[in-house]
């Protein structure tokens, strides 16, 4: 049976020496991933990936990491085709299940294992580093590795017998701070997850050891890498400008019809999707849809499949504001939400600043639920909606900042009060000890011959 291509992806919006085509090919039941340079000057990049794979294999020996094996065949690289779950998908699953402790522990374990895999060396700035990442100023000392795969993303890591990495083309043999890779791991997971706002509110960067000041420095490195290094063509010696960046300069302007259609449709009608979880995770197969009009109070009734222990309610497919949500069981009892992935404005309003709003509710021996709510949907085609969402986000962030400051002030006052109470207690103890000592001295004096003689003298004098 002859080999055939079943998928192709062109990575050509970059300098010609880095442009590649990625194919998934099938021959019978065997699938492989094939990478080929699009231009002659890109052959060295293909060879670089092969050489890096051998270096990383050696570096990861004895660790929980491995690399997706590859082989050179002509001018192409062939990789094993993996079908395991990615770490990214599993981490998002933990968040959907509200298992944030497990999520943070697993991400932290991944980051720690990456830091410890292979030998570490003190980082030193080199000309090669400046060429790729720019001349940045660091605020502390870092460790580095002999080979650094800066694309060790959760999306590039498969949960096989070990953590198997794919797509390691952006690996370098000059010193790069390990924390920069940690920054990229957190950054790209956070900003591609449907739970971005929730993750940012939990200070996930700081929990993984990246300070706010370092985030700014590493962002400068990332911009130089993406906008300068990847775009500087070695043939023309000019910066390559992707077509996506040229729209404003080459077009007199345009109107995208689809967003306008979505805005008009969402203004009148939307649909709610309810997921039913029994034993496994949520799936499209175990879900149902109901359409509703957005200009009135929404009322719905859902029959729950046998064995349902949790439901997930997706009220819309756009950013939205949900108000006065009430969920009742068969007997009309009000049910309490387990969680949601939005921002609580007050007790009756939840704002979702992303397109995947979700409510979670634990279920026990309930056959039917009725749902009522009001909703305002924000479709990203209208400037007014953008301004509303941006304003809401600003207010929420300001409120969170105020709460954090008040909490810190309260903690400082409590600490000061504790110190005052401790000091006063110590002073009271010292005074009591002095009083007790004086009482003992007086008691001892009353037992002396001199005191007794003095008492007799007072009696005689008073006669």
Image (cartoon, grey):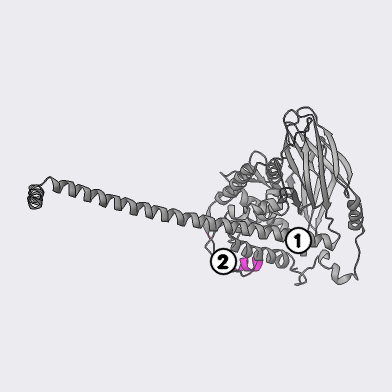
- Residue 256, placed above or below residue 457: below
Instruction: Determine whether 43 is above or below 307 in the image.
Output: below
The image quarter in which residue 42 lies: bottom right
Magenta segment: 122-134
Percent position of residue 226, x then y: 71, 63
Q: Nearer the viewer, residue 399 or 191?
A: 399
The image shows a total of numbered marks equal to 2
Q: Which residue is mark 2?
A: 138
Of label 1 and label 2, which has the lower sequence position? 2
Seen at 30% across and 53% down, the residue is 431
361 horizontally vs 455: left or right: right
Q: Residue at x 37, y 51 (%)?
A: 425
Please tell me whether mark 1 or mark 2 is closer to you in this view: 1
Label 2 sits on a secondary structure element that is loop
Q: Residues within 10 Å of mark 1 (few under 14, many from 20)?
A: few
Q: Would you say residue 123 sits in the magenta stretch?
A: yes
**On the image, numbered disc 1 is attached to which residue?**
390
Q: Nearer the viewer, residue 447 or 295?
A: 447
Q: Is residue 444 visible?
A: yes
- Image quarter where the N terminus lies is top right
- Where does the image place residue 163, in percent across and percent down from the top left? 64, 44
Badge 1 marks a residue whose secondary structure is: helix
Q: Is residue 344 visible?
A: no
**Quadrant location of residue 30?**
top right
């Amino acid at each position: 049976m002859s080999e055939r291509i079943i998928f192709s992806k062109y990575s050509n919006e970059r300098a010609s020496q880095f442009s590649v085509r990625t194919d998934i090919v099938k021959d019978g039941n065997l699938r492989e991933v094939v990478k080929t340079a699009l231009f002659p000057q890109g052959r060295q990049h293909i060879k670089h990936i092969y050489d890096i794979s051998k270096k990383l294999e050696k570096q990861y020996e004895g660790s929980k990491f491995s690399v997706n094996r590859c082989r050179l065949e002509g001018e192409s690289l062939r990789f094993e085709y993996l079908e395991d779950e990615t770490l990214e998908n599993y981490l998002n699953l933990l968040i959907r299940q509200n298992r944030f402790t497990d999520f943070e522990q697993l991400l932290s374990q991944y980051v720690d294992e990456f830091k410890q895999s292979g030998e570490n060396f003190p980082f030193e700035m080199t000309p090669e580093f400046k060429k790729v990442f720019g001349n940045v100023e660091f605020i502390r000392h870092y460790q580095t590795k002999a080979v650094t795969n800066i694309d060790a993303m959760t999306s590039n890591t498969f949960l096989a017998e070990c953590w198997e990495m794919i797509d390691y083309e952006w690996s370098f043999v000059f010193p790069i701070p390990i924390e920069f890779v940690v920054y990229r791991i957190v950054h790209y997971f956070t900003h591609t997850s449907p739970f971005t706002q929730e993750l940012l509110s939990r200070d996930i960067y700081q929990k993984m050891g990246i300070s706010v000041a370092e985030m700014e420095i590493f962002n400068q490195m990332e911009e130089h890498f993406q906008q300068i290094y990847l775009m500087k063509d070695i043939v023309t010696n000019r910066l390559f400008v992707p077509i996506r960046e040229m729209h404003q300069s080459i077009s007199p302007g345009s109107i995208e019809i689809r967003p306008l259609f979505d805005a008009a449709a969402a203004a009148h009608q939307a649909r709610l999707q309810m997921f039913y979880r029994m034993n496994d995770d949520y799936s499209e197969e175990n879900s149902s849809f109901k359409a509703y009009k957005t200009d009135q109070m929404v009322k719905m009734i859902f029959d729950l499949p046998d064995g349902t222990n949790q439901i997930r309610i997706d009220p819309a497919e756009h950013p939205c504001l949900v108000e006065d949500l009430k969920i009742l069981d068969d007997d009309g009892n009000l049910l309490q939400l387990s969680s949601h992935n939005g921002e609580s404005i007050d007790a009756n309003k939840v704002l979702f600043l992303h397109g995947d709003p979700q409510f979670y509710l634990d279920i026990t021996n309930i056959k039917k639920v009725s749902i009522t709510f009001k909703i305002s949907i924000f479709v990203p085609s209208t400037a007014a909606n953008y301004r509303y969402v941006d304003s809401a986000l600003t207010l929420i962030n300001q409120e969170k900042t105020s709460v954090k400051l008040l909490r810190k002030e309260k903690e400082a006052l409590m600490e000061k009060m504790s110190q005052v109470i401790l000091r006063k207690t110590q002073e009271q103890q010292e005074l009591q000890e002095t009083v007790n000592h004086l009482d003992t001295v007086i008691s001892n004096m009353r037992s002396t011959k001199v005191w007794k003689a003095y008492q007799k003298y007072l009696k005689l004098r008073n006669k």
